[in-house]
Image (tube, grey):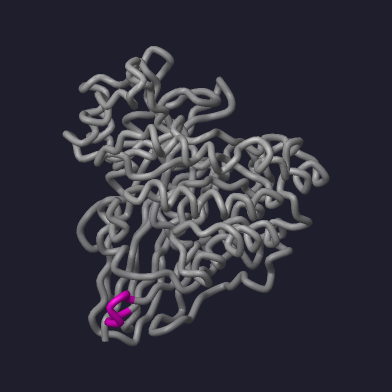
Amino acid sequence: MNKKQFHIGAYLLQKNARTEAHVRDIAECGLDFIACLNLERNGRGTGFDTGVLDLFSRYGLGCIVSGVLPGWWGGNGERAGQLCDTNPLSAYEAAAASFTDHPAIWGIDLGDEPSALDFPYYGKIAETVKKCFPNQFCYLNLYPNYASVASNTVLQTRSQLGTETYEEYIEAFVKDVPTDCICYDFYLYSLHDLPRMYDNFRIVSDACRRTGRSFWYVPQVNSDRKEETTSVNRLRFQAFTAMAYGAVCLIWACWCGGWWYHNVLDGEGNRTEQYGKLKTVNADIRRIADEYMKYRSISTHLIGFDTDDSMGRYSDVLLPSLSVGSFSGVRGENGEKLAVGYMKAKDGKGEALMIAASDDPYDENKREVIVVLRCGCTDLRAFGTDGGNPLTKEADGSYRLRLRSCGGALVTAEP
């Protein structure tokens, strides 16, 4: 995996979706990799079947593999703190001894949603895996701030996290587990709790900035209700909000059936309507991604949320307009809500704003959003999802940026 690029992945590839035509569809949808690809033994006891991996290499794809190491899932928290008893380090060393390397294998899955009580031992696992699998990175997905399921009580959530607060959970992770990124899932359209979603973004993105780790996020393309599919605009909202918080990798849940309904492929391995939606949004992201990766995330600001009573507990970070760096007066022309990420160039030559239209997260009232801003730099450009430059300069020296509903754009400025 080239860590200098923005990556888009998706979870799971079932056995009936591993033909060349299926792999070509993955590439043409705009994905870079499949996460938690469960490898199968080749039947000869000498390693894994590499057929699908060879196809991945042919189409420039990678994967994070499952089924290589001993599995672990935090689940409802009943096994918290028991990882060391269940999975001895010798089991990871034995797994490495029977492993067949392949260039399409980018990462090794260590497990899913562990308790903080298991983080110290996960640190030992990560060090062992790094030593035994020198060509792969360690992948470990964390709980969201509501823990495993949206219906959890506060007590159940604490039991799963192993800490009193989510901040403590993330702090324990970065202290004990030496991974290159922090990755977690948050399924907004199951939980329907926007304040909690933004708070989860805040906690993880702050930790990534502070520790120099990459921010990976798992949004949903599927739905937990049979009667509802996730719309194109809901996909856009998740993706561009994550980018406003500095995410450099998205892993959509799910490509094949793993949980819930309306995944990108159905149970027979056929495309659903979600395929076209995801392809559209991935293309939107690609129009921004290369330029976006030239910058590093510094801070994120919520604009226009200051009159939203549901966001009251975050009143100290809600602003009617934003002034940061060379930018000033950044706001929605009609008071629309925006998530705005402030970024600085990695080469030290300039700064940028990643702006996400946040006015219609549930795709109920589509409308164009116009962002007003000023900038002290003369070389100002914008990269939008429709291509071209969506930025215009007004007679008074201000700029107008047009965003589609739930869309995003990167505005760059050089002195």
Q: Nearer the viewer, residue 196 or 70?
A: 70
Instruction: Answer with left or right where residue 146 lies relative to residue 376.
Output: right
In the rendered view, would you say 338 is above or below 260? below
Residue 85 placement, left or right of 209 = right
Q: Main secondary structure of the magenta part?
A: loop
Q: Residue furthest top?
A: 268
Vertically, is 383 above or below 109? below
Residue 309 at least partly seen: yes
Using the rendered view, name the quadrant where residue 169 is placed: bottom right
Query: x%, y% of residue 310?
Result: 71, 56
In terms of image quadrants, where is residue 252?
A: top left
**Which image quadrant: the C terminus?**
bottom left
At horizontal 58% and vertical 25% (from top left) the residue drawn is: 225
Residue 406 visible, this angle: no
The percent position of residue 109, horizontal first and vertical second, equals 46, 40
Q: Residue furthest right?
A: 155
Above or below, 354 against 191 in this view is below
Residue lying at 29% horizontally and 61% vertically, measured from the top left: 4
Question: Residue 117's x, y, as percent?
Answer: 71, 50
Residue range in magenta is 345-350
